[in-house]
Image: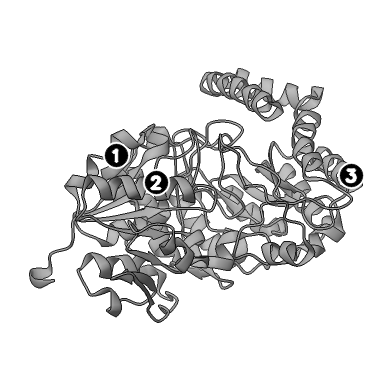
Amino acid sequence: MSGGRYLHTLFLHPPSYEGFDGGAGSRYQARREVRSFWYPTWLAQPAALVPGSRLVDAPPDGLALADVLPLAREHELAVLHTSTPSFPHDVKVAEALKAENPRLRIGLVGAHVAVHPEDALAASGAIEFVARGEFDFTIREVAEGRPLADVRGLNYRTNGTIHRTPERPVLEDMDALPSVVDVYARDLTIENYFIGYLLHPYVSLYTGRGCRSKCTFCLWPQTVGGRRYRTRSAERVVEEIARARRLFPQVREFFFDDDTFTDDLPRAEAIARGLGRLGVTWSCNAKANVPYDTLKVLKDNGLRLLLVGYESGDQAILNNVKKGLRLDVARRFTRDCHALGVTIHGTFILGLPGETRETIAETIRYAREIDPHTVQVSIAAPYPGTAMYREALEHGWLRGEALVDGRGLQQSALSYPHLPGAEIFDAVETFYRRFYFRPRKIFAIAREMVRDRRVMARRLREGVEFVRFLAQRSR
């Protein structure tokens, strides 16, 4: 494109199910137990590379299709982030945008289309291209107006024929990516982003991509990020948080959404010391094997909470999904966190390969024993592109159910001869009730509410949402 002009580009998280968090994490995208939205960092990153672009995140802003349709007339290129559960909705949004502006060029990004690029293109003539793998610089080159045939990492359509360009090399220099916080400040309302276990308002971002663990269920490392942890320098991370503090003085917590921020312990400690000098409160994803000495450095430098994937209380199941974690190590780690005053939000998955009624009961006992401050209980989600999906196909465990129902609530897509999907679904509610509805936990939450009126107001609202969520699941 002559003169260095970029196509006027819209980056869109489309409206879909009410309250649907389509940009969320490596395990699953769905409606949460309480109103929860992660930042659209995967879209903000290429938006930061395309001058004059705009990022619109419809779900947290409460935008319906009618609200985003006028944007079609204001842009030349629209890039939509999609996921397996929301894909049919997102295709309809793409078609509506194309009908509104037939000259609008539309592309899709995300793990779903990275795995099935040709099927995604075949779903609708409104979709001109899909990007595979890491798509930051892929999208920038499209926005520059380059011929699609010259852009690596694409599947695209011309005159009814689908073409595939060569793979784009994995990005090694993560410092080459600009900060996303300026895009957040320009386009997002940060108060619209809630996570039940994080202080509000919060800001989340990535300091690296990829994960060294081999978990068979985890979506992003198997489709986009890869198995190597590629990171930004500690200095750049601290600089970005310092800038975010200036842009968002109201923020109470920063969250690092790397799949496993603690994969590189010396780097995590270096970042922590930099954040300690800034005096910020921060949290991150961690594996339940961080040694005490590192935990102490992190805690002494502003760490408040760790988001920890425990998954199961049965060692055989952890081995089945290649978690690379021993229960005795996880117990020691949890005791260390409790001793240091590091809060834990523990995540568990029911219905993983090897699950039985007995292992579900054991996992509930284990969760109550180690007693993280809060828990998230999800159903094993066999996403296309993961080893667990291939295993389920091979063994006939897929029962034809969608990953979410018509309201965006998680369903059990897996069913075993000895453990039907309906039992896995019902066990989620049992888990929540047995974990939270006990005197020790009720007292801890009540004490937290009494100490902070903001927490009290929020917990009361979330309590209503949680009870409503359980009622919806029962229906």
Q: Nearer the viewer, mark 3 or mark 1?
A: 1
Q: Nearer the viewer, residue 187 or 224?
A: 224
Which mark is on residue 357? Answer: 3
**Residue type highlighted by circle 3:** Arg
User: Above or below — where is 298 with respect to 31?
Assistant: below
Q: Position of residue 226 (x, y in %)?
A: 55, 71
Q: Residue at x 26, y 44 (%)?
A: 186
Name the foreground residue: 367 vs 350: 350
Q: CA distance from mark 3 to mark 1?
A: 46 Å
Is residue 443 visible in the rendered image? The answer is yes
Residue located beneath label 1 in the image: 68
Q: Are marks 1 and 2 in contact (CB under 8 Å)?
A: no
Give the residue drawn at x 39%, y 44%: 14
Question: Which residue position is annotated with label 2?
Answer: 92
Give the image location of residue 223, x and y in percent.
54, 66
- Marks 3/2: CA–CA distance: 40 Å
Q: Residue at x 44, y 34 (%)?
A: 201
| Residue 251, image x, y percentages | 41, 37
Looking at the image, residue 107 sits to the left or right of residue 350; the answer is left
Which class describes the residues within 10 Å of circle 3: few (<14), some (14-19), or many (20+)? few
Label 1 or label 2, whichever comes before in sequence order: 1
Compared to residue 414, the image places residue 154 above or below, namely below
* 3 or 2: tag closer to the N-terminus: 2
Mark 1 crowd level (few <14, some 14–19, many ≥20, 10 Å Cα): some
